Image: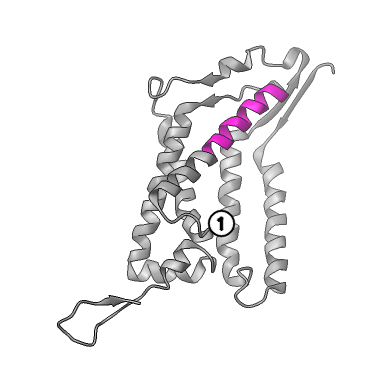
Amino acid sequence: MGDVNYRFEAIPVLGPLLCLVFAFLAVQAIRARAGAGWGWRFVPLRFVTALYLAGVIGFTFFPFQIMYGRYADDIDWTNQINWYLLVTLDPSAVPNIVMTVPLGILLPLLSGRVTSWRRAAVYGAVFSITIEVSQVLSCVLFNNYRGADVNDVLVNTLGCVIGYGIVRWALTMRFTGDLLRRLVLPASAAARAGQHTVTPAADSGSAARVR
């Protein structure tokens, strides 16, 4: 294949993709039926999600390099995987925790499946493992310096759980809860949670009942 050294920056790649995503959302909003989950009311949440995913991709994969020949990284890709859980944990774990806090916040607003701490942890772990595997594949296929770290999976999962806790707390507050429920997708866990309202019992001495 010869000597190849291509370097791609995040903004020239992800910027046009985000423009296409916004155009797609706008077209869907124009064509959407009431209650379909694609109206203008849902565009902000969907586009914020696209911005978040673009940010994660930019943080974890860019600048993206393709190197062959004399430019290729000579390090064996198996040495690019850190299997030592907690032993090599360092301050770089903090941004990895912060990175997935928004994921934990967004999941209950988008999906009806994330209804518990356990499910938030599972989704966070799957999200992180997908990133780590993709980074290893990037190293194998394009000979760049990307690698994987089992500690990243741990702290990414923790960040997602923290985000889930934040949104659960926000939904219990009157102002933030009402605001979020106006923006969430109709079939999301947050929307379903908002359908349960508390009404006073007929007898002032009895406890409130949930309908």
Name the residue: 72% across, 50% down: 16
Amino acid type for the residue under numbered disc 1: Val
Q: Percent position (x, y) of residue 186?
A: 54, 69
Q: Percent position (x, y) of residue 56?
A: 56, 42
| Colour scheme in use | one colour
Q: Would you say the magenta stretch is mainly helix, strand or loop? A: helix
For the C terminus, give its image quadrant: bottom left
* Residue 138, magenta (yes or no): yes
Q: Is residue 120 above or below residue 63?
A: below
Q: Which residues are magenta?
A: 128-141
Q: Is residue 170 above or below residue 128?
A: below
Circle 1 residues within 10 Å: few <14, some 14–19, many ≥20: few
Name the residue: 54% across, 66% down: 185
Name the residue: 37% across, 54% down: 166
| Most foreground residue, 69 or 141 | 141
> Which quadrant of the figure has residue 59?
top right
Q: Percent position (x, y) of residue 103?
A: 49, 49
Name the side, left or right, on which 159 lies relative to 15.
left
Q: Is residue 180 visible?
A: no
Q: Is residue 178 visible?
A: yes
For the N terminus, give its image quadrant: top right
Q: Percent position (x, y) of residue 54?
A: 61, 46
Secondary structure beneath label 1: helix
Q: Which residue is mark 1?
A: 48
